[in-house]
Image (cartoon, rainbow, N blue to C red):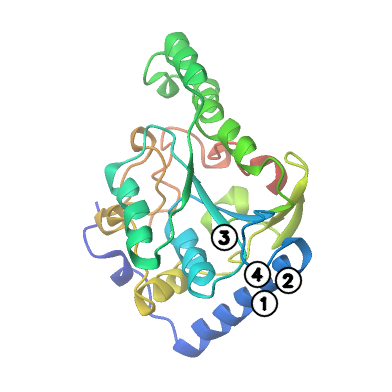
């Protein structure tokens, strides 16, 4: 397991390159705002960032909140998150004075899921795992995106094989709205350079070898050199490692 601080495990990035990436991303966010945001202060909630509280989403959160962009931010609490992940919510409120909105799965759906497959039935098959993801993540996301005009994600192309052809701007057929991924071209090193340079709060699990963090039972630390998503649903094939939030519209 990796034990070095996450920012020290990636190559350094030239500050000029990082600043260029930031300028590109600000330009993408400005385009999204011009096309989809009705107001100037984000209160209309037509344009939203769906944050997993991972490093990429923390970069976008920092850009949005520091520059007072009219983009609302929300996250999904599946009921199975690590305590370290939940602490990030508190740190965002402390650092920026803004609370991230939290959506939870419907209680009845969770009760039925546990009754049918047990508390950890998702280990038994991909179908069971995807059923869990659907109740805890996919359906809450549908509620969170209801009535929006566009959503923003922190997805990057190099994260996994399923995201290698990710578009910066696309039409999300599942949710019937525009989908933007402003960090699609960023490298992991550039993400960490931003986090370090701008002192952005991040999940403490990243310093314990966790590269991509989801629900506690489905996430583990990875060995140095492993794929960033190797610690997610490690018992499945890499080509299937999506929870359903992004896979349909990114194919």
The circle drawn on residue 31 is 2
Q: Where does residue 82 sit, x and y in percent of width and height?
A: 31, 41
Give the foreground label among 2 and 3: 2
The residue closer to the viewer here, 171 or 121, is 171
Give the foreground label among 3 and 1: 1
- Residue drawn at 58 percent across, 34 percent down: 138
Secondary structure beneath disc 3?
Answer: loop
Q: Is residue 152 visible?
A: no
In this rendering, the count of numbered labels is: 4
The 10 Å Cα crowd at callout 2, few under 14, some 14 to 19, many 20 or more, is few
Disc 3 target residue: 156
Left or right relative to 173: residue 212: left
The circle drawn on residue 27 is 1
Q: Are marks 3 and 1 in contact (CB under 8 Å)?
A: no
Q: Where does residue 95 sit, x and y in percent of width and height?
A: 35, 66
Secondary structure beneath disc 2?
Answer: helix
The 10 Å Cα crowd at callout 4, few under 14, some 14 to 19, many 20 or more, is many
- Residue drawn at 36 percent across, 40 percent down: 219
Disc 4 target residue: 29
Q: Are marks 4 and 1 in contact (CB under 8 Å)?
A: yes
Secondary structure beneath disc 1?
Answer: helix
Q: Is residue 64 visible?
A: yes
- Residue drawn at 55 percent across, 79 percent down: 22
């Amino acid at each position: 397991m990796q034990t070095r601080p996450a920012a020290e495990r990636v190559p350094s990035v030239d500050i000029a390159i990082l600043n260029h990436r930031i300028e590109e991303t600000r330009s993408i966010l400005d385009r999204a705002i011009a096309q989809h945001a009705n107001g100037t202060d984000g209160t209309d909630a037509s344009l939203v960032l769906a944050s997993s509280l991972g490093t990429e989403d923390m970069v976008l959160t920092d850009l949005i909140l520091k520059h007072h962009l009219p983009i609302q931010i929300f996250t999904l609490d599946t009921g199975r998150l690590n305590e370290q992940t939940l602490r990030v919510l508190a740190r965002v409120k402390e650092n920026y004075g803004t609370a991230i909105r939290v959506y939870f799965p419907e209680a009845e759906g969770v009760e039925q899921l546990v009754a049918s497959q047990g508390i950890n039935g998702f280990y038994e098959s991909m179908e069971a795992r995807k059923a869990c993801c659907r109740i805890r993540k996919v359906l809450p996301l549908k509620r969170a995106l209801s009535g929006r005009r566009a959503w923003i994600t922190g997805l990057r192309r190099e994260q996994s094989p399923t995201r290698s052809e990710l578009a910066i701007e696309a039409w999300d057929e599942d949710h019937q709205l525009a989908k933007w991924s402003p960090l699609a071209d960023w490298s992991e090193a550039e993400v960490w350079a931003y986090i370090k340079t701008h002192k952005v709060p991040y999940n403490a699990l990243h310093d314990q070898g966790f590269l991509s963090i989801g629900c506690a039972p489905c996430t583990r630390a990875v060995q140095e050199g492993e794929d960033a998503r190797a610690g997610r649903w490690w018992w499945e094939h890499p080509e299937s490692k999506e929870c359903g939030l992004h896979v349909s519209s990114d194919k």
